[in-house]
Amino acid sequence: MITDTHSHIYLDVFQEDIDEVMSRATEAGVDRIFLPNIDKSSTAQVNALAEKYPQRCFPMMGLHPCSVNENVAEELAHVKAELDTGKYCAVGEIGIDLYWDKTFFKAQQEAFRKQIEWAKEMQLPIIIHARESFDEIFEIVDEMNDERLFGIFHCFTGTIEQAKHIMNYGGFYMGIGGVVTFKNSGLDKVVKDIPLDQLVLETDAPYLTPTPYRGKRNESAYTRIVAQKVADLHETSIEHVAEVTTNNANSVFKV
């Protein structure tokens, strides 16, 4: 069994063929898919898919850093109200993104801190989005890390030094997706040196489609391609990678 720990297959681009998308995932051995929320506008879609496939799709609740703007207070109130329902398996995706826009950097930091606090209170994992922002993320996690804080650094594309920093926290895994298959990403050399017991698999569908499907819509079935690449890098079988990474995912999400 392969687990896709991070997939946005609830978005409109999947509306026409979601049943086929789920069938292809099954054929590829991808049995469980975790759905990170983006903001208020995506919540209904996340929940609808989780309700349609209750044994396979699991919803998270959080405010994506790229959705942090003038109405951040309203968005965070929505996140808190949803988390209070108790139906979510994680707080995510949350974090800091300095790739697109730095205008709301301070607000992103505050939203990240607030959502970490809620996760700790509710004993939920956090799913961290860290694009062009490892130092800024580390600054906050260094300060807030304790035995109640755990989760996943989603879409890990960092250096081996940054991987070691994450491993030293004690409660975090690194999410590996399609980027590991990109020819010049350099991530393959890093992943080779990270123990399997520190990794989980993901797609970030519909984004970051692995080779050989780059340029096309990503989907959860392609987690298998990522699993095979990680297996090749670790010189082991895809079955072993599937088992270890699924166990890791289970220990995070407790589903």
Image (cartoon, grey):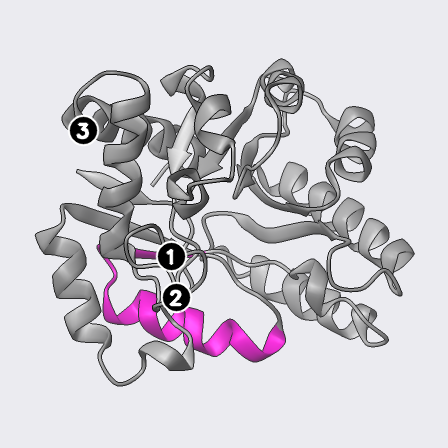
Secondary structure mostly seen in magenta is helix
Residue lying at 26% horizontally and 49% vertically, measured from the top left: 32
Q: Which residues are magenta?
A: 40-59
| Viewer-side label of 1, 3 | 1
Residue 73 drawn at (x, y percent)? 82, 69
* Crowd class of label 1 (few under 14; some 14 to 19; many from 20; radius 10 Å): many
Residue 31 drawn at (x, y percent)? 19, 48
Residue 99 drawn at (x, y percent)? 73, 56
Residue lying at 79% horizontally and 45% vertically, measured from the top left: 113
* Crowd class of label 2 (few under 14; some 14 to 19; many from 20; radius 10 Å): few
Q: Is residue 43 magenta?
A: yes
Q: CA distance from mark 1 to mark 2?
A: 7 Å
Specify the quadrant of the image occupied by residue 82: bottom right
Which disc, if any, is residue 3? Answer: none
Q: Secondary structure at mark 1?
A: loop
Which disc, if any, is residue 238? Answer: 3
Residue lying at 72% horizontally and 71% vertically, measured from the top left: 75
Q: Is residue 130 magenta?
A: no
Q: CA distance from mark 1 to mark 3?
A: 19 Å
> Is 31 positioned to the left or the right of 41 in the image?
left
Which disc, if any, is residue 209? Answer: 1
Specify the quadrant of the image occupied by residue 183: top left
Mark 3 or mark 2: name the one nearer the start of the chain.
Answer: 2
Q: Quadrant of the C terminus?
A: top left
Residue farthest toward the bottom in the current orientation of the protein: 16
Q: Secondary structure at mark 2?
A: loop
Marks 1 & 2, CB-CB < 8 Å contact: yes
Instruction: Say which amino acid is labelled 1.
Output: Thr
Q: Which residue is mark 2?
A: 215
Q: Quadrant of the N terminus?
A: top left
Instruction: Say which amino acid is labelled 3.
Output: Ile
